[in-house]
């Protein structure tokens, strides 16, 4: 898959293509439906497929400080998009000047002059251009002038965990914030991931026999509610079953909120300075302060047992990550 940043990265000889545009934060199942349809139609038409997204989130430019917590950084989005068979991803730097492009100018500058769109595939609520004035109907009108078609993919509703709402990044963010990582995974189609560099913490876990990787999370990351979770610690492509703690360490009256993962049965790891990711599978319990260190250790051992069983059951299921 080709990866471009900015319109100037697009090859000069780029021909017709099928395009879909959006923030695609999290690349949830609704996004997958739209992108998958774009890939399918590109194959039918014999042209490449292109996903166009933005950096930073448009809200951060239009209303600084207002953009929502991010479900996935751009490199993670590109990984997830590549799995869907897309030929190219274009990340457009979203600047104040870019935000002022009218819908018509956006279409000409991006879809017509650079990507030579033959077909544009979008969801029903797609908006674009200055003040989000453009919609799919206007996009289709412009297509009659600039020789491209528009196909709208009607997003399905979520199941019980999503409350029967349409697939959306907003829904995933709410579920993550509530600690319902299993519900978030149902909407995403993959576990919610938090990532960053492993840094030194208080090293209490190591002293207690449960050494944890303390993740210095990327800015603006959507972090689950405080609690203990089952999931995976992912380092250098290796995915290890993990018990995960999110929040302040109430047992020791700590104040800093952290994301820490214990790779189950792996006490030999030296991860300091490495980039690592934590994938969340299930919520186990809330944060508690125990009467003694012995009671804490007993509870931690139970957390590890539950996490081990849940991960083993999931890894043995037909649906993968």
Image (spheres, rainbow, N blue to C red):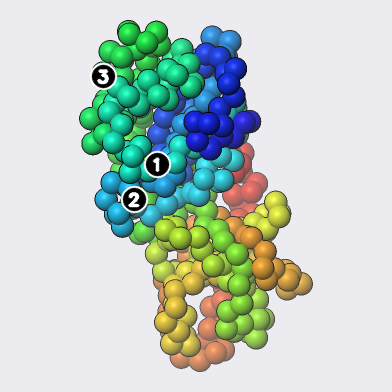
**Residue neighbourhood size for the residue with mark 3, other residues' Cα within 10 Å, grouped as few (<14), some (14–19), many (≥20):** some
Residue at mark 1: 94
Give the percent coordinates (x, y) of residue 62.
Answer: 28, 46
Q: Which residue lies furthest to the bottom in this view?
A: 292
Residue at mark 3: 138
Q: Residue at x 27, y 28 (%)?
A: 102
Q: CB under 8 Å between callouts 1 and 2?
A: yes
Query: Which quadrant would residue 209 be assigned to in this image?
Result: bottom right
Residue at mark 2: 60
Q: Can residue 264 be seen in this view?
A: no
Give the percent coordinates (x, y) of residue 57.
Answer: 38, 46
Q: CB under 8 Å between callouts 3 and 2?
A: no
Give the percent coordinates (x, y) of residue 240.
Answer: 67, 58
Instruction: Provide the secondary structure element on which disc 1 rests.
Output: loop
Q: 78 or 179: which is nearer to us?
A: 78
- Which of disc 2 and disc 3 is earlier in sequence? 2
- Which of disc 2 and disc 1 is earlier in sequence? 2
Depicted 250 relative to depicted 185: above or below: below
Q: 170 or 197: which is nearer to us?
A: 197
Depicted 133 relative to depicted 108: above or below: below
Q: Residue at x 26, y 18 (%)?
A: 137
Quarter of the figure with the N terminus: top right
Measure the C-alpha gap from mark 1 to mark 2.
9 Å
**Residue neighbourhood size for the residue with mark 2, other residues' Cα within 10 Å, grouped as few (<14), some (14–19), many (≥20):** some
Depicted 63 relative to depicted 148: above or below: below
């Amino acid at each position: 898959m080709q990866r471009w940043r900015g319109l100037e990265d697009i090859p000069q000889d780029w021909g017709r293509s099928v395009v879909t545009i959006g923030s695609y934060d999290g690349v949830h199942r609704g996004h997958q439906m739209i992108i998958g349809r774009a890939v399918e139609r590109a194959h039918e038409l014999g042209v490449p497929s292109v996903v166009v997204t933005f950096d930073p989130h448009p809200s951060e430019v239009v209303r600084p400080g207002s953009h929502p917590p991010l479900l996935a950084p751009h490199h993670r989005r590109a990984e997830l998009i590549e799995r869907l068979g897309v030929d190219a991803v274009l990340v457009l730097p979203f600047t104040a000047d870019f935000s002022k492009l009218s819908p018509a100018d956006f279409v000409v500058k991006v879809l017509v002059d650079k990507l030579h769109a033959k077909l544009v595939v979008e969801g029903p609520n797609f908006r674009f251009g200055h003040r989000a004035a453009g919609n799919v109907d206007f996009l289709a009108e412009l297509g009659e002038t600039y020789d491209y078609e528009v196909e709208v993919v009607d997003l399905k509703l979520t199941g019980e965990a999503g409350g029967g709402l349409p697939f959306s990044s907003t829904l995933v963010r709410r579920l993550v914030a509530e600690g319902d990582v299993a519900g978030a995974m149902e909407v995403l189609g993959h576990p919610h991931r938090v990532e960053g560099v492993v840094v030194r913490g208080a090293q209490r876990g190591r002293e207690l026999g449960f050494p944890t990787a303390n993740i210095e999370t990327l800015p603006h990351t959507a972090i689950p509610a405080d609690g203990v979770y089952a999931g995976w610690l992912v380092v250098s492509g290796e995915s290890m079953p993990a018990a995960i703690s999110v929040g302040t360490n109430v047992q020791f009256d700590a104040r800093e909120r952290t994301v820490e993962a214990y790779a189950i049965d792996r006490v030999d790891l030296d991860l300091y300075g490495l980039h690592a990711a934590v994938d969340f599978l299930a919520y186990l319990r809330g944060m508690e302060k125990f009467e003694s260190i012995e009671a804490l250790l007993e509870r931690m051992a139970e957390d590890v047992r539950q996490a081990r069983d849940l991960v083993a059951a999931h890894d043995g299921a037909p649906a993968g990550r």
